[in-house]
């Protein structure tokens, strides 16, 4: 009788199972790669999600520019001094993320090795189930077959994540462009860039805000650190 345990699931979608022989205690490694990786296909967002994201970016650029020129009459953005100039953009990013949260569980991807479409929660649950069942393998052939199922499950989880990433970016940028245009708040002009077209500023703002709160937080921190260094007397650390 041979006993197996799951050794590792790597990010590329490959799974490893180790066979521990009860008589010799010699470990035997068996590996499997998911069906799509075997065909040489990397994990990219599905075409439908790429198209949706591209349409969202284009719509955001047009609508954001229209909002800047024609909507929100009387609204203006006069940033205060210091790091506070980025407060509005940080609030926008946080608000957009909260708006999107209820919709993220509905993003799906086609199951690797099958035709069913699965949400991220379902894909993760199935992967955990596959990992648990892999430990019950009793022969090398059985372990290899179960490792393949685990690898396919990991690939499905990665595929949902890729779809979710591109869709969230596109929708975030769209909302950010609309809001920045309506509020007359362009990131490029805020940091001191002059002479740029409105639509360029709107697009740049949407892309940065759409990337999430971390890039904005890093930008704020770096500018604050740079400002403090300029204010420090010569020779101080």
Image (tube, rainbow, N blue to C red):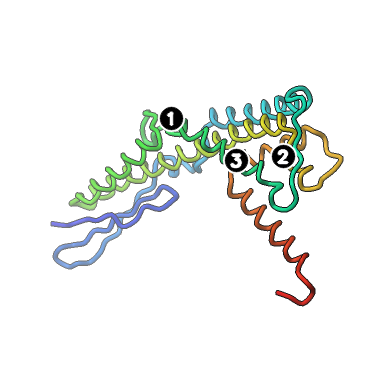
Q: Does 56 sit left or right of 6 as displayed?
A: right
Distance (Cα) linking label 2 and label 1: 28 Å
Horizontal and vertical percent position of residue 60:
67, 29
Task: Name the foreground residue: 12 vs 235.
Answer: 235
Horizontal and vertical percent position of residue 160:
45, 37
> In which quadrant will I find the C terminus?
bottom right
Tell which circle, 2 or 1, labels the residue nearer the N-terminal end: 1
Residue 167 figure quarter: top right
For discs 1 and 3, the disc positioned in front in the rendered view: 3
- From this view, report whether residue 234 is shown above or below residue 51: below
The secondary structure type at the circle numbered 3 is helix
Q: Say if mark 2 contacts mark 3, CB within 8 Å.
A: no
Residue under label 3: 93
Residue at 28% in and 48% down: 131
Residue under label 2: 204
Crowdedness of circle 2 by 10 Å Cα count: few (<14), some, many (20+)?
some
Residue under label 1: 106
Q: Say if mark 1 contacts mark 3, CB within 8 Å.
A: no
Q: Does 114 sit left or right of 191 as displayed?
A: left
The secondary structure type at the circle numbered 2 is helix
Residue 228 figure quarter: bottom right
Residue at 74% in and 60% down: 227
Horizontal and vertical percent position of residue 98:
51, 36
Distance (Cα) linking label 1 and label 3: 21 Å
Residue at the bottom extreme, as displayed = 235
């Amino acid at each position: 009788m041979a006993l197996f345990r799951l050794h590792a699931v790597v990010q590329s979608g490959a799974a490893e199972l180790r066979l521990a022989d009860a008589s010799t205690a010699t470990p035997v490694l068996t590996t499997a790669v998911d069906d799509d990786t075997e065909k040489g296909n990397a994990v990219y967002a599905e075409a439908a999600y790429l198209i949706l994201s591209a349409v969202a970016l284009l719509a955001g650029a047009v609508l954001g520019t229209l909002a800047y020129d024609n909507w929100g009459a009387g609204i203006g953005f006069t940033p205060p001094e210091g790091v506070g100039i980025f407060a509005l953009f940080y609030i926008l990013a946080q608000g957009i993320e909260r708006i999107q949260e209820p919709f993220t569980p509905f993003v799906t991807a086609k199951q690797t090795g099958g035709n069913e479409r699965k949400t991220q929660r379902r894909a993760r649950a199935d992967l955990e189930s596959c990992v648990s069942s892999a430990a019950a393998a009793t022969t090398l052939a059985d372990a290899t077959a179960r490792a393949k199922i685990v690898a396919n499950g990991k690939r499905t989880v990665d595929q949902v994540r890729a779809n979710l990433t591109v869709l969230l970016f596109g929708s975030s940028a769209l909302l950010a462009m609309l809001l920045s245009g309506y509020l007359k708040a362009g990131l490029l002009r805020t940091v001191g860039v002059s002479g740029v077209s409105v639509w360029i500023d709107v697009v740049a703002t949407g892309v940065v805000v759409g990337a999430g709160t971390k890039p904005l937080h890093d930008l704020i921190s770096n500018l604050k650190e740079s400002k403090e260094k300029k204010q420090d007397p010569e020779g101080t650390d």
